[in-house]
Amino acid sequence: MNRIKIVLYNRALVKRKVAHRFRIGVRDSGKLNLRLALLDPMGSGLLGISEEVVEGIAKRLLEAEDKRVPIDAVTAKYPGITINDAYRIQLKLIEKRKRRGEVVIGKKIGLTSKAMQQVAGINEPDYGHLTDRMVVLEGLPIRISELIQPMVEAEIAFVLKEDLKGPGVLVSDVIRATEYIMPSLEIIDGRIKRDGRRIEDSISDNAGTGRVVFSGRMSSIADVDLRYVGLVFEKNGDVISTAAGAAVLGNPAQAIAWLANKLSEYGVSLNAREVVISGSLIAANKVGPGDNVTATFDRLGSVTAKFVD
């Protein structure tokens, strides 16, 4: 067995590197404290990609969205990028969106099924941010020309009335903290080409969030066992998929608990009045101009989206 070489760094040097390369996580967000793995098995002590690289990737992702032209996979140029690096890029991307006037209204959870996690090569979901400009009112058309490679997922959205701060958040805590739930459709979209894309690319790209449509019907969570809530997903009048709430980590409320606990690793909490979409019950479906999709949830109601050029 090869021995792992441990390299001892001058403390001042390491401190300068950390301050320079991770100031987005500490200084810019004011909340995020990333945990750093300073030593790799070969003893090279890499600290992740630089702040300049993070800035450059976030800029390219925003430009790709504006121009409707996807960029090459980030991991193709930076194969050693980590999950933490990817979330740093996502945070920088959200900062840029906020400077353009967008308001963060909540978060999304992705990769909540074991099958999708195995495909992505991870053992937990991922998450992204929702802003007000991503929301499309139900009944209004969604323009395909404003997207790059859209696909639709059906999810249950949670609107919180209390803060949820991990660690230790349980399903019972999520139920207590939820004001109401409602059907939703997430239109996922990628600013990164699908060929060769890895989980780090998806996270960098705000977990592929494009648009979201919320139902006008709000339901109390108190008397609903979300594990057994059935779903029928239709496209242009044809039933495409059926599922139950248990497809999302066994219970969509468990997905919310996971996110609250995950965010606690960075000193962040889910806040009252935030909306969180808990992960799709079905596989994503491609859509194009002229398509109409409807997700009908047992006891919760339905939500519809229509797509035009």
Image (cartoon, rainbow, N blue to C red):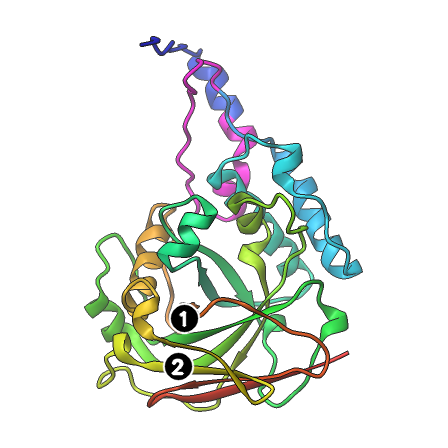
- Which of the two discs, 2 and 1, labels the residue nearer the N terminus? 2
Pointer 2: what residue? 231
Q: Which residue is at the front of the view, 106 or 32?
A: 106
Q: Which residues are magenta?
A: 18-45
Q: Percent from the top left, x then y, of residue 19?
A: 51, 29
Q: Main secondary structure of the magenta part?
A: loop
Name the residue nearer the viewer: 52 or 294.
294
Q: Which quarter shows the C terminus?
A: bottom right
Say which mark, if any, is on residue 82.
none
- Quickly name the residue at label 1: 281
Q: Amino acid at mark 1?
A: Leu
Residue 254 to residue 87: above or below = below
In the image, farthest residue toward the right: 67
Answer whether residue 32 is magenta in the image: yes
Whole-Å distance between the Cαs marked 2 and 1?
8 Å
Residue located 65% across and 43% down the image: 73
The stretch drawn in magenta includes residue 191: no
Residue nearest the observer in this picture, 264 or 41: 41
Vertical placement of residue 10 versus 29, above or below = above
